[in-house]
Image (tube, helix red, strand yellow):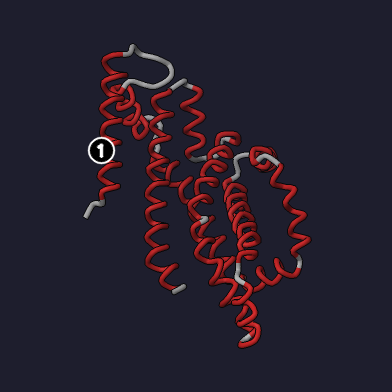
Amino acid sequence: MISQQSKKNLKFIFSLLIFYIVLFEFLLPRNNFIPQPTIFYESFLHLWSVYHLLFPLLSTATIVYLSILISFVFIFYFRIVIIKNIISYRATFQVFNIFKYFPAFFIVLLFSLWFKDSLSAEIVFAILVSSIMLIKKINQLILDVKNEYIIFAHQINPNKMFSEVYWKSILPKLFSYLYDLQFYLWILILIYEFISESYGIGLIYKQAFTYNDIGAIFSISITVSLIIWLSNFLIKLIEKKKIYWDNE
């Protein structure tokens, strides 16, 4: 059953599509800002026949989502150690806040200069970024754990305080952070591939940019947006069926 909000969203998208077709296909001449619908359609077909988008798309998507999965599994298995160290050495962790003033582009540029188009380096980079971002989020969420839960667990069973109280308290918000993390990681990996010319969507972007193929650039962006949207849907599904259910 489609909700009223979903129907409204579909109507809005359909209206926007009609507006785009009428305006840029019939009323406005060809321009360098937004491609005509016919050019956009041809560019979309060329992505698969000329740019051979399928395998670069699979490569980049695999790096993004595999790195998130590896990072999350790593943090899950070492959650007690991570939480204990964050609590014990909070002042030390606060020192790392200085890195938030470094632009992400700087880190991407360094890795690109150091390792060029190495696929292994790109995977390591993605896993490091995912892990650091998740640990940083844990560091923030720990402050929100209710004191009464901590006191109660400390009195009843101190051994399970970190795995039961802290972890289960922060897990819903930590999992919800995956929405932002995957978007952030997509941007970084695309920049990485664009700069280093390593195999993936970023390289396709660079080729389209070199050929001044604005239709291809729009088509790639919409394709990536659809993947992120589908991933968000999957995250929301897992969140509702598994994460919140386990924490009830």
Disc 1 residue crowd, few under 14, some 14–19, many 20+, Cα 10 Å: few
User: Position of 93 compared to 180: left or right?
Assistant: right
The C terminus: image quadrant: bottom left
> Compared to 63, does 204 lie above or below?
above
Q: Residue at x 65, y 64 (%)?
A: 143
Query: Percent x, y for residue 158?
Result: 65, 84
Closest to the observer, 41 or 200: 41
Closest to the observer, 45 or 227: 227
> Compared to 86, does 231 lie above or below?
above
User: Position of 238 compared to 71: left or right?
Assistant: left
Closest to the observer, 4 or 61: 4
Q: Residue at x 29, y 47 (%)?
A: 5
Quarter assignment of residue 86: bottom right
Quarter assignment of residue 72: bottom right
Closest to the observer, 216 or 199: 216
> Compared to 32, does 228 lie above or below?
below
Number of labels in the image equals 1
Q: Secondary structure at mark 1?
A: helix
Q: Residue at x 46, y 48 (%)?
A: 61
The N terminus: image quadrant: bottom left
Q: What amino acid is labelled 1 in the image? A: Lys
Q: Residue at x 53, y 51 (%)?
A: 181
List the single residue furthest toward the top. Answer: 29
Query: Percent x, y for residue 214?
Result: 43, 23
Query: Percent x, y for residue 140?
Result: 64, 59
Q: Which residue is mark 1?
A: 11
List the single residue furthest toward the left. Answer: 1
Query: Percent x, y for residue 53?
Result: 40, 37
Quarter assignment of residue 141: bottom right
List the single residue furthest toward the front. Answer: 148
User: Position of 177 compared to 100: left or right?
Assistant: left
